[in-house]
């Protein structure tokens, strides 16, 4: 019987078979690890590109809805009258329009979904919060955001109007709002 105490111990990283010189030396390869790294890198780059493109698309959509993205050139005006010609009477400026101070979008069902509330504004004063769905303004039923815009434009600034909303919780509430002026 062989004594195990006198047998040399293999060095760290070697198996007993490698120490004795029997069989081929096996070394772990880094190829699977490299393939995993490159796959992770490609997936990360793809996800980053997708997020960037989505952000650009959302930015264009917001700019289009809010009307910010138009050209910054001079507004169109009538040419000045020729010298010696009689000046034609110009139309009076449009009267100030009423506003609620909210930004809305079409809801999934009937109503206009409140997406943003301007803090110093009539909607904020009345108690509107983001996520509310406006169902009625005065006597006008609101099915879309365009319906709400038409109903607000018909309101007289400074006069209180009854506003029916549905909150996120599903509760209905009638609020009193006083549309403000936009000059």
Image: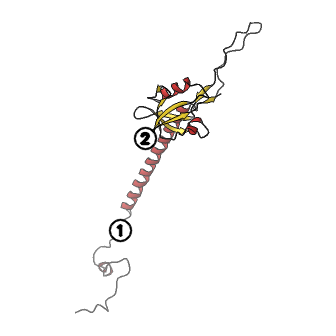
Quadrant in which the N terminus appears: bottom left
Identify the residue at image location x=43%, y=41%.
Answer: 171
Identify the residue at image location x=43%, y=44%.
Answer: 169
Q: What residue is disc 2 on?
A: 171
Number of numbered discs visible in the structure rendering: 2
Whether residue 60 is visible to the viewer of this picture, yes or no, is: no
Q: What residue is disc 1 on?
A: 28
In the shown orientation, is residue 46 left or right of residue 160? left
- Picture disc at residue 72: none
Q: Nearer the viewer, residue 17 or 136?
A: 136
Q: Nearer the viewer, mark 2 or mark 1?
A: 2
Whether residue 84 is visible to the viewer of this picture, yes or no, is: yes
Label 1 element class:
loop
The mark nearer the N terminus, 2 or 1, is 1
In the shown orientation, is residue 174 left or right of residue 86? left
Residue 117: x and y in percent read 55, 39
């Amino acid at each position: 019987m062989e004594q195990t105490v006198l047998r040399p111990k293999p060095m760290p990283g070697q198996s007993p078979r490698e120490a004795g010189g029997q069989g081929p030396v096996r070394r772990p390869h880094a190829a699977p690890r490299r393939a995993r790294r490159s796959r992770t890198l490609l997936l990360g780059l793809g996800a980053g590109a997708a997020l960037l493109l989505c952000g650009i698309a959302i930015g264009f959509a917001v700019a289009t809805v809010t009307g910010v993205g138009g050209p910054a050139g001079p507004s169109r005006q009538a040419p000045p009258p020729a010298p010696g010609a009689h000046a034609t009477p110009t139309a009076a400026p449009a009267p100030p329009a009423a506003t609620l101070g909210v930004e809305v979008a079409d809801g999934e069902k009937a109503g206009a979904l409140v997406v943003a509330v301007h803090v110093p504004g009539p909607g904020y004063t009345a108690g509107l919060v983001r996520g509310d769905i406006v169902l009625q303004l005065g006597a006008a039923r609101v099915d879309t955001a365009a319906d709400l815009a038409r109903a607000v434009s018909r309101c007289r600034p400074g006069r209180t109007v009854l506003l029916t909303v549905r909150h996120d919780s599903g509760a209905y509430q009638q609020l009193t709002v006083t549309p403000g002026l936009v000059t």
